[in-house]
């Protein structure tokens, strides 16, 4: 059949057809982006996944293991997942690396040298075509997502005089907020810093006030920064060696501090933020507290709504989840006893005196359920309801190379569990 249209009309038809295909593909691309887990604890740094259609119970031997990646090195870093790639960190052959894997099969795509710590704790942060990572000794790097090519580098100690509160090394996941990267060098005059994400140039540094309190230790802790708009002011909230601090996003001025939650060994859990409230907890017998942030003169103040002592609630290093009006976590120092409390009152909705697994539990939420990963390598599925404790299933993960501490991640129906040099990928979608 002969096409009698002019070349220009044929070209126009092709453009229209191509545009039509693009529109058809748009929902799929958007869904993939929505399911990405591009930083520490997910898109909002709260451990909450938006995915649906996941298993509500598990077979006795667990969900299907899709693949297992090896040679990732030493470390407790979790993973970031974006645009079909997985990013993590680990120390191998005496060098810390930022490593990129193919999400389809776990095959290594590239590895970029970061530092010389003896292991790695940072979960990388992905922002478009760049990836950011922090070495154990404070080496902050920005690399190209395509091939790992280094774009810029800073050093917390050399460039800021930074320090850690104790000896386990820098562990935070850098925060990207618009054109800025927010990080925690832990120096007296640079407790928190804002950098140009494109160049690494310093935009501002936030000093730690002298009178913040006596609890804890000077320096950065093991938490990661979250964004709050409490009292109508955009601010960065971080758990430091001296407790929780809020600094203004525009210029880094200190807005408020709270010292009571600090311990002198390791302050770890990332704070929870909602509206004008900040919820914080720490192990080593520190406890937990709800703060309300309010205007005060030209600044803000943090008022303690309630404080829970360590017997009532303390989260060691497994993280906390805020869903609706309730907070879920593993309670106890070095323990993961399932606990649900009402956020605004601290009232216990339910409490289990023993967990299904042993020791600390790192947790994640997805599709109505909490995923508890215990230190001994047991995974537990718990229904996320304040009505009562409902255990839906358990299984022992396929690797156990040390304390099973890295936080679990779900992206595109896959459950990712890092275990030192191994990464396990499970399919948790409903059939």
Image (cartoon, rainbow, N blue to C red):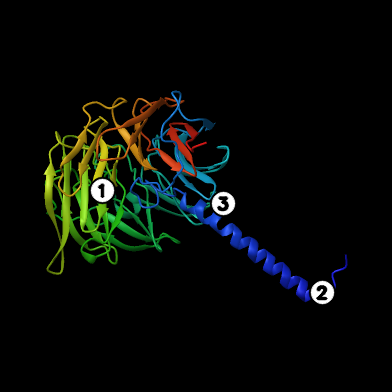
Q: Are marks 1 and 3 in contact (CB under 8 Å)?
A: no
Q: At x 52% / y 36%, what residue is drawn?
A: 431
Determine the secondary structure under disc 3.
Answer: loop
Q: Quadrant of the N terminus?
A: bottom right
Q: Is residue 89 depicted above or below 300 in this figure? A: above
Q: Position of residue 39 (x, y in %)?
A: 41, 49
**Residue at the farthest right position:** 1
Q: Position of residue 326 (x, y in %)?
A: 24, 45
- Mark pair 1, 2: CA separation: 64 Å
Determine the secondary structure under disc 1.
Answer: loop
**Residue occupied by mark 3:** 146
Q: Residues within 10 Å of mark 3 (few under 14, many from 20)?
A: few
Check residue 5 in the rendering and tell me which mark sits there, or answer none: 2
Of tags 1 and 3, the one toward the viewer is 1
Q: At x 18% / y 47%, what residue is drawn?
A: 242
Of tags 2 and 3, the one toward the viewer is 2
Along the horizontal axis of the image, is 222 left or right of 348? right
State the residue in front, 373 or 322.
322
Q: Residues within 10 Å of mark 2 (few under 14, many from 20)?
A: few
């Amino acid at each position: 059949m002969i096409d009698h249209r002019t070349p220009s009309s044929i070209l126009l038809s092709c453009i229209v057809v191509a545009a039509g295909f693009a529109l058809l593909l748009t929902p799929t691309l958007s869904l993939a982006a929505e399911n990405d887990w591009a930083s520490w604890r997910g898109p909002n740094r709260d451990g909450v996944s938006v995915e649906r259609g996941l298993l509500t119970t598990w077979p006795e031997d667990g969900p299907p293991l899709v693949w297992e990646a090896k040679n990732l090195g030493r470390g407790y870093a979790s993973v970031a997942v974006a645009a079909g790639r997985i990013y993590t960190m680990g120390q191998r052959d005496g060098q810390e690396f930022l490593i990129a894997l193919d999400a389809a099969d776990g095959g290594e795509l590239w590895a970029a040298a970061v530092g010389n710590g003896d292991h790695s704790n940072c979960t990388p942060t992905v922002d478009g075509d760049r990836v950011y990572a922090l070495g154990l000794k404070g080496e902050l790097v920005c690399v190209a997502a395509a091939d790992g090519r280094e774009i810029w580098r800073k050093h917390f100690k050399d460039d800021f005089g930074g320090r850690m509160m104790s000896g386990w090394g820098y562990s935070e996941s850098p925060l990207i907020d618009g054109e800025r990267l927010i990080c925690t060098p832990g120096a007296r005059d640079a407790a928190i810093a804002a950098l140009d994400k494109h160049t690494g140039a310093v935009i501002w540094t936030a000093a730690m006030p002298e009178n913040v309190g006596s609890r804890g230790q000077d320096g950065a802790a093991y938490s990661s920064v979250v964004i709050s708009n409490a009292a109508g002011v955009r601010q960065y909230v971080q758990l430091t060696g001296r407790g929780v601090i809020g600094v203004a996003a525009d210029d880094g001025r200190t807005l408020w501090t709270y010292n009571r939650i600090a311990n002198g060994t390791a302050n770890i859990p990332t704070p929870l933020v909602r509206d004008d409230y900040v919820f914080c907890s720490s192990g080593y017998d520190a406890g937990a507290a709800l703060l309300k942030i309010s205007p005060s003169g030209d600044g803000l103040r943090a008022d303690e709504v309630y404080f829970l002592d360590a017997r009532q609630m303390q989260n060691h290093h497994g993280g906390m989840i805020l869903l609706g009006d309730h907070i879920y976590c593993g309670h106890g120092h070095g323990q993961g006893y399932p606990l649900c409390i009402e956020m605004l009152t601290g009232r216990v909705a339910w409490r289990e005196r023993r967990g299904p697994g042993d020791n600390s539990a790192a947790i994640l939420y997805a599709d109505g359920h909490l995923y508890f990963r215990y230190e001994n390598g047991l995974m537990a599925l718990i229904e996320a309801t304040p009505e009562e404790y409902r255990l839906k299933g358990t299984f022992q993960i396929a690797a156990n190379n040390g304390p099973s501490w890295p936080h679990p991640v779900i992206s595109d129906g896959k459950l990712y569990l890092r275990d030192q040099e191994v990464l396990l990928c499970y399919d948790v979608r409903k059939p």
